[in-house]
Image (tube, rainbow, N blue to C red):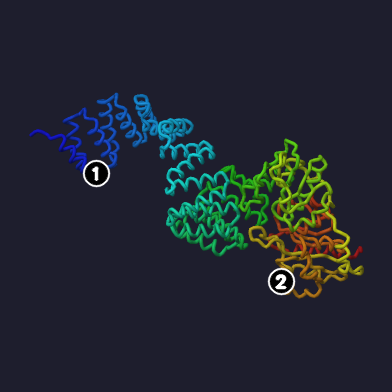
Amino acid sequence: MTLDVRAEFNRAADLHRKGKLDKAISIYRRLVKAQPSAFEIARLLVLAYLQGGHAKEALVAARRAHERNPTNPHAHLLLGACLQAVQDLEPALAAFEAAARLAPQLTEAHFLAGGVLGALGRQAEAVARFDQVLALDRRSTEALANRSTALLQLGRPEDALNDIEALTALHPGEARYWIAKATTLLELDRTAAAAAAADQVIRLSPKSSEGYALKGRSLMSRGRLEEARDSFYAALEHNATDAIVRDELIVVLRLLEDFPAALAQCDLALAATPASARFRQHRAEVRRAGEDFAGAMADVEGAIAADPQLASAYVTRARLLGDLGRSEEIRPALELALQRDPQEPNGRFLTAADDLAHGRWTDGWTAYESREHTLPPPFRPLAFTRWDGRERPEMLVVLGEQGIGDELLFSRLVRLLADDDIRTVLLTRPGLVPLLQNLDARVSIIGDLSEIDTMRPGLRWIAAGSLPLLLQPDPERWPEPPYITASPDRIAKWSWVRDESLFTIGINWQGNPSRNVDVGRSIPLAEFAPLAKLPGVRLVSLQHGAGRDQLQQVPFADSVVQLGHDFNADGIFTDTVGVLHHLDLVISSDTALTHLCGVRAHPAFVALRAVPDWRWGYEGDRSVFFPSLRLFRQVEPGNWGGVFHAITEAVRSMTRGA
């Protein structure tokens, strides 16, 4: 019986379209035997094999078709596709290149070659191939998409963004291109534009989690944490299994200090994936914030056991070792973190802190530059050129950063700039402007940039914490205190505080209440009780804001002079700096007040936790930054009794000699 090739071919093609691949393949095979030189039949047989998951059979059929049609570029494409399907990439590339040589105008050949080059990691060559495709067809959507991916791999995000913007212009209703745009803008740190692109994703695909996740990341980068939190929650509503988004949500909740919610998210994640090292580490950080150091250490040890390569877990362990007073073990833990990820931001920053605590100034200040990659960022870069210390700027804006104490610590370094005749402006938080106004007559102090022409040539900026690296690493050679003064009217305003018959001590017990900052640093006011019992001693509360309520909870409250609710009402420390003139001594926890005493060269006793912040070092009773301060360190972590016994005896000795 004669085979009706056309009828059988049509029947096979119909079965193929309907997804009945096995039946279609059976007919195609008979037809290939009957007409071995008919390339279209062979091509459809190969495609049916590939669609049915029979890559090896497809490759055999493609080789036969290629052998019978050596000058047909599509036969080379077919062979290349089958080789690519079995991950034999170099021969696949050779087949696609052969097709391109046979038909230089065949865009598919260049496109497929570009795809294989990308898979082989040869991104520059891949870009060149996609360039050829776009030279032939400038509206080729897939070529634009693939070239943008290759450009990102090459570290050329601006060029990639150009392609992605072309894609969104060609296909404004395609959410995937807006996803790519938002992702690339985030990489470029153009967070406002990234948020706008993410909003477009949400409009186009409201049930997709990706738009909400991208918006959350852009808001998080801009410090808008409450909105970021809400976006991450929305993303999880649409995809509750997205571990990356849950991880980001927990980070935001920790930064917002919503530790119960953070703990709930950790527990949800660990219920689904009990072996997750990352979520165990998160739970360790949450427990650390609650000063449950034993529970936190158990979690972080579990995280390391689950994933010995998780660098951030070793960083958490290093923090906990500090909390537990085991300073000699901190550096080895950080080294383990950086062996696993040399760029781990918190690991680099804590390594810098350890170097600075040990007086390794050059290494410490160099590594201290890593601080801007931590969360929350210590400062927001300004919109003009950052100073690198090499050129001489026409005007330099020094950007205050981190906490009030940090601003006071680093502010003296603007004097070195002024000594070098560099026109310097110190940009600080508005509340500090009155205090710093007389820092140096040669330096302008501002609270915003409204009076600065940010487009002027030669304008540069630098973060204050970068000045030691650029100017003078050794604090022994920094300008010496005092370098901030009080106005005569402020001194006169608080003259009533002094009683010449008494030894007058200002006290401060609570610093920044943030649990992300104040783990073990603040002191219960009750610990000051032995001082209140000393004869001839007058205590004056310098506490401002958080912690004042403790005065209602201690039996010696009536013996503590309070300075009123309008104390420092018109600026940070504006009254405190006047009060200092009438105090014989200040006793404080590690707070901004201790820095104020330091910059005023005023005597102060500083009560420190067992392993304190880097600026106080790990041993000794004196500060290289502030010689007027005397340091009292915990011997046992968390135990302030010994510290205040030593402080009380020191005060007793001073009053006897007074």
List x then y, in percent, for residue 535: 86, 71
- Residue drawn at x 36%, y 33% is 108
For residue 17, the mark is 1
- Residue drawn at x 70%, y 39% is 388
Residue type beneath disc 2: Asp
Quarter of the view holding residue 59: top left
Label 1 crowd bin: few (<14), some (14–19), many (20+), radius 10 Å: few
- Residue drawn at x 79%, y 49% is 444
Camera-side residue of 501 and 359: 501
Question: Would residue 210 appear left or right of 340 to someone viewing this image?
Answer: left
Q: Secondary structure at mark 1?
A: helix
List x then y, in percent, for residue 507: 79, 65
Quarter of the view holding residue 460: top right
Q: Say which label, 2 or 1, has the lower sequence index.
A: 1
User: In this figure, what is the number of numbered marks?
Assistant: 2
Question: Would residue 14 appear left or right of 242 to someone viewing this image?
Answer: left
Q: Which residue is mark 2?
A: 549
Camera-side residue of 488 and 310: 488
Question: Would residue 346 appear left or right of 95 to someone viewing this image?
Answer: right
Cβ atoms at labels 2 and 1 below 8 Å apart: no
